[in-house]
Image (cartoon, grey):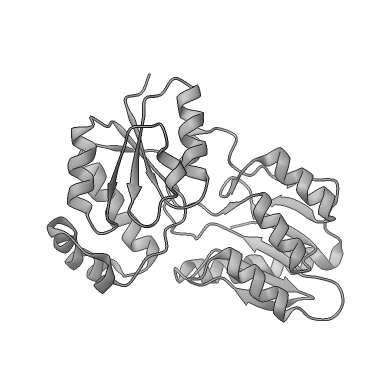
Amino acid sequence: MPGRLAIVAGSGPMPRRLADTARRAGRDVFILCLDGITDPATAEGLPSATVGIGQIGRAIETLHRERIAEVCMIGPVKRPSLSAIGLDARAIGMLPKLWRTGRGDDALLRLILAELEGEGFRIVGAHEVEGDLLTPAGQLGRLSPDAEALRDIALGVKVARALGALDVGQAVVVQQEQVIGVEGIEGTDRLIERCGELRLAGRGGVLVKMRKPQQERRADLPTAGVDTVRRAQAAGLVGIALEAGQTLLVDREATIAACDAAGLFLVGIAPEP
């Protein structure tokens, strides 16, 4: 049995869900909450501690004190400006490396993971803790994309790859072979809402979500679930395409059922490299 697991908890319900899954499998779980980010219910009834988002040194000290063997990072984290983070000495010492490698989310995440690994912690992905989280390939619901939707998906893949290579975002909405919106710092939920306001007359668009080419697979994989479906329906979209094996599909059966009920297709795509 692997050693004690720490879940570094971003926002949303996924950190608690993952903790409960790990506990059912017999794992000893510790929650490292991020001040002002982690939902209060995440650590309820579980051993936990809270650190500021810029307190890298304190986080590492806490993990050592709690005798953590493995670390899993899950849940969205909206990064504030450096001036608002409140960096501790360890984090300040990492800044020169960040300036050299790039200031995007991926560069920062890789730097943090390297610091943790250098301290002897093993980094595990959420899909390693909960085995059925990765999106499978193929048609997942009752509906399938028609020829027009397939063309939208193909364009969305090209745009998402270009965005990802620049460390911009993971998702794009395409309608009638026109790019309606691309994901930036606001995240996928706001992208979908914005595209609902910008939608063209006629048949609705498609959400395409893919892992960035250089994205660290053990943390921050693109995620979709029932809430994504609800937002897509409200925005007038006709379907969702997720990169198979590279995106997390939360509550798979419930999400598929929500797509069927909303009249949306859901597909796992495995585009050619």
Residue 13's place in the image compared with 209, above or below, is above
Percent x, y for residue 90? 15, 56
Number of marks in the rendered image: 0
> Where's residue 54, x and y in %?
25, 59
As drawn, 72 above or below 202: above
Q: Quadrant of residue 167?
A: bottom left
Depth check: give the residue in front, 8 or 128. 8
In percent of width and height, residue 269 lies at 68, 52
Q: Is residue 51 left or right of residue 233?
A: left
Which residue is rendered at x = 59% and y = 69% of the image?
Answer: 190
**Horizontal and vertical percent for residue 176?**
80, 76
Residue placed most toward the observer, 114 or 58: 58
What residue sits 66% from the left and 54% below the top? 227
> Would residue 99 be seen by someone viewing this image from the given angle?
yes
Left or right: 130 as drawn, with respect to 155 = left
Q: Is residue 149 left or right of residue 207?
A: right
Q: In the figure, is residue 40 to the left or right of 203? A: left
For the residue pair 153 and 5, the one nearer the viewer reads as 5
Which residue is rendered at x = 74% and y = 69% of the image?
235
Quadrant in the picture for the N terminus: top left
Q: Residue at x 82, y 55 (%)?
A: 262
Q: Is residue 218 visible?
A: no
Query: Which quadrant is the C terminus positioned in?
Result: bottom right
